[in-house]
Image (cartoon, rainbow, N blue to C red):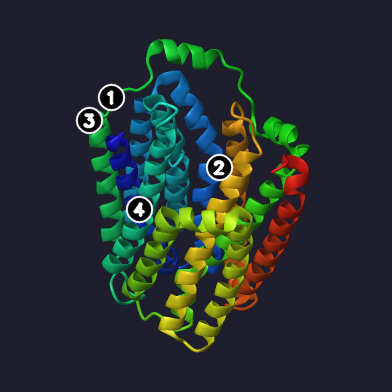
Amino acid sequence: MLIVFLVIVLDLVGFGVMVPILAYYVVQLGGGPELATFCMALYAVGMLVATPVLGRLSDYYGRRPILMLSMVGAIAGYLLLGFAEALWVVALSRLLAGLMAGNIAAAQAYITDTTSIENRARGMGLIGAAFGLGFVIGPALGSYLAGDDFATANLFLPAMLSASLSGAALLAIIFLLPESLDPAQREALRNEPHVGRLQALRELWGRPLIPHFLVGVLVFNTGAGLVESIYPLWVRDTGIALGPRDLMPLLLVSGIVLSMVQGGLIGPLTRAYGEHRLFQLGALGFSLAMVGTVIAGENSSYYGAMAALALQAASAALVLTSMQSLVSQCAGPTERGLVLGVYSSAGTLGRVLGTLVTGVIFARLHIESPYAVAVLLMLCLFFIARSVQAHWREHLGS
């Protein structure tokens, strides 16, 4: 199980390296904010399409072959990006990387194969910890390696580092990771009926409260996609950062706060206040963080932007953890995978929508427009959370 953890950490650090600097690739090649966020959205599009497919293929052919395939594809995507001299190559590299990001489904399946029911939560917690490490270390590394000047940012070195990390993960899979799925299990999984996401959505839409969570995660991820993908260009245009390296402390603080809340504070907070209150508090906190970000931008305040980003990270952790916990309670033991799969797809769709439109409104309306729209979306999310709490006892009796 620790080898799977290592593989996921290496993969996500490599992904995180490119997160804060991809927009500068597009700008250096002559694109604007619209094209920058379009290229970012292609990653989420690929992930939306590939995750269930790769998860299902891992049932047919085993976990190791799918994990190895995804790492080879990730390496190819980073190499394409590092040597890109045209915008279409950048777009292709991000789509390929997104298609390969579906390996998380195979990694989760590997954990399921190799843990007992009693240890399942611990195994899935390792994946969460790997995400936390990846999003603390990766963006900080990427912004540091890119240098201290937007116009001459070194984008080749971060791409090669990401390719190298994926290569290390591939070697770990080849030499250290045994197959978890024996032929008998594969045969049994092949014979299980497969439910498509649209069919599953139709089945779940009539259930009490589940539509609230599907709309809620769509709204949240749309808002998060609006502000997170445009952030590197926003700090440049507001004068908060003079070069990519100035992003490193901002992203490092944000990642540490996110990891602290998700990894340590969420348990005591949930016991003290309950998921419903934390869900509502997170939505309001995210709204306040957006207001704080706008104020920091208008005053070119570096530490104001850092404080707002820290509040945004803490609020996101509260919303995501609380929503996932609550939606899982709406599903029976034998259908949690189905419910959480549809829930995850709704979230990824929101990320696609937010990332696609943010560059357009940033460039054509005002650089603070994505944050204003995000405030409205998070206020909508707050009222969704209130509605869930109001109807919870009626439908679930607890």
- Residue 159 vs 20, above or below: the answer is above
The residues bearing labels 2 and 3 have C-alpha atoms spaced at a distance of: 29 Å
Tell me which residue sits at (63%, 46%) in the image.
346
Q: Do the residues labelled 3 and 4 touch (CB within 8 Å)?
A: no
The numbered disc on residue 226 is none
Label 4 crowd bin: few (<14), some (14–19), many (20+), radius 10 Å: many
The numbered disc on residue 134 is 4
Front-lying residue, 309 or 298: 309
Residue carrying label 1? 178
Q: What amino acid type should be assigned to the residue bearing mark 4?
A: Gly
Q: What amino acid type should be assigned to the residue bearing mark 2?
A: Leu
Front-lying residue, 244 or 264: 264
Residue 373 relative to residue 134: left or right: right
If you read the primary sequence from the N terminus, does the residue marked by circle 1 or circle 2 appear first? 2
Q: Do the residues labelled 2 and 3 touch (CB within 8 Å)?
A: no
Note whether residue 356 is visible: no
Q: What amino acid type should be assigned to the residue bearing mark 3?
A: Leu
Label 2 crowd bin: few (<14), some (14–19), many (20+), radius 10 Å: many
The residues bearing labels 4 and 1 have C-alpha atoms spaced at a distance of: 23 Å
